[in-house]
Amino acid sequence: MSQQEKFQLYVYDGDYSLPSLDVECTKSILYTAVAGVPVQVKLLNSLKHCLLYSAPTFVHKNLAFKSFGEIVLYLRTLNYNIDNKLSANQCSESLALTNLVQAKLKPVAEFAYWLDQRNCDEFTNVWFMKALPIPFNYIHTRRFRDKAVGLMETIYPVECNLEVLKEFINRMATDCLSTLSTKLGTNDYFFGVTPSTLDVIAYAYLAPLMKLPFPSTEINSIINMWPNLVNFVKRIDTDYFADLPKQPKYLKQPEKTTSSDDDVSYVAILILTVSATSLIIGFAFSRGILSSSMS
Amino acid sequence: MSLIDRITVELGAQEPWPKDVKLFQPYDVEQILLPDNANCLAVQAFLKMCHLEFQLELRANAESMSPTLKVPFIKAGRFVTAELEGIVQFVNGKGISLTDKLDANQKADMRAYMSLLHSVIEVAELYICWVDKETYNEVTSIRNGSIYPWPLNHIQNVIKRHQVIKKLKALSWYNKTLEEVFQEVENCCEALSIRLDGKIYFFVDGPTELDALVFGHLFTILTTPLPRSDLANIVRKYPQLINLVKRIEDEYFKKQIKN
């Protein structure tokens, strides 16, 4: 047990009943939860942690693994493997589907987080600015955005109009989600009764898009077209992350006035009413209608 | 796929397959590189599987002519469509499809495996061609620069290499070692071989675009002489895949020569 107590996982903080706001961190946390690794999850919220680690980092003794792929490979050498019950056929299918999810859903997530102007300005950027200590909040948000831009340039090099790009990415995502939904069918998980790596990766991309209060809700409504995928995310929530709080941690008051264009602001109505009334009264006075009746 | 592509598919559907379809690709003897050649061959195989006629048109600047800046692309009547996925949709729009008989589950399978090939084998080919020093110096730089006069060839090579490396970085492949790249390719071949499972084609009803894509990539890897033969050696470990490649070559590419 003394050896196992030294497993540490450094991640970005979670919120809105997500284990972490970063997709790669969510994958790592869920994988360790499913495999039953006795890991100590630490948050990147102090200067010291931000200085020493990037997220996700898995630390064991003096070894550090800095990506989900490396973490999984290392955990396999320690016999923490959640795919060992899969048949050869299922392994082959799992590899193909994980690649599909990575190739098609990663652009959607990156776009929703960092390239959609409203989402980024009103939610993602603000959240990360508050969750990370100065000056790392500036460095990390800049790095996230640069990565997202780089990815978009490689998948669609000829187009720089964001609206066209968004349509292209949403179509890719729709294709991928319909494939996933067909494969999942009415099962609890993709292969059998316990989650495999494919479930972990699918959850990590779907959950943030469903749960985060993004100002533009387009992708959320796309996911809601497949109820079995929505139930799949809820199932993993209840099985592994039942005790995560739903209330926002960093953004105390989600601004209701900006969250929807259709909401009527009462302050604006008050100002309009007052100015209109005073205008009428002023007009009445100037024409002598009111003054005559008062005298 | 943008709006223009969709209009192409919808408008193109009204006309039958024209006689003068041309498939544009770079010069295959002295210019084309491994990943491009694989994609061009995949499209040729697909069109042959559909029994559609086309003429090969070799152009040095095919890449810059393509609407998506990737080869190959076809010109059918008034329409120009690029890359395998786009061409498959264009052909499907005309009522010709290899995947009619597949159910939703099989179509999902096909999409997943095609994405596997694009995101593993194709990226690995790019890595070998542009990042591996030996291959870059002996093959890639010479072939890619062959169509430009000195000193433009060197400038073009540097620009193109920079673009590819940027792409590999975005896909987080640039920091992989050669061994890791070969391991990824091997996993991918293993998965394909298991999925094929002794059948003639990936789906019992006959060849599909997945078979065309697998053929394009594996045939190119097996037949292209490179300073490093590791990729070809990995593929040779899977006799089932070799048989599939040979079968498609005999069926669709040798017939033409006899005629």
Image (cartoon, rainbow, N blue to C red):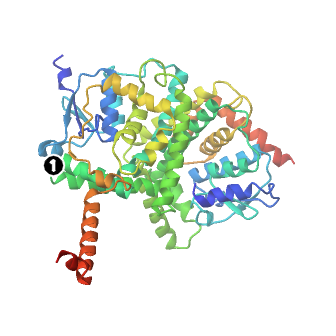
Measuring from the top left, give residue B51's x and y in whole percent.
80, 46
Q: Is label 1 in a helix, a strand or a loop?
A: loop
Vertical placement of residue A282 versus A207, above or below: below
| Quarter of the figure that contains the N terminus of chain A | top left
Q: Is residue A25 left or right of residue B119?
A: left
Horizontal and vertical percent for residue A223?
47, 39
The residue sitting at 39% across, 50% down in the picture is A112
* Residue B242, picture quadrant: top right
| Pointer 1 residue | A133
- Asked if residue A218 is positioned above or below residue B79 in the image, the reply reads above
The residue that appears at 35% across and 34% down in the rendered structure is A27
- Quadrant of the rendering where the C terminus of chain A is positioned: bottom left
The residue lying toward the viewer, choosing from B79 and A181, is A181
Q: Amino acid at mark 1?
A: Pro
Which of the two residues, B175 or A180, is positioned nearer the viewer here?
A180
Q: Is residue A229 left or right of residue A139?
A: right
**On the picture, is B184 further left or further right than A239?**
right
The residue that appears at 32% across and 33% down in the rendered structure is A28
The location of residue B212, given as percent across then percent down, is: 67, 42
Instruction: Name the outermost residue toward the right.
Output: B259
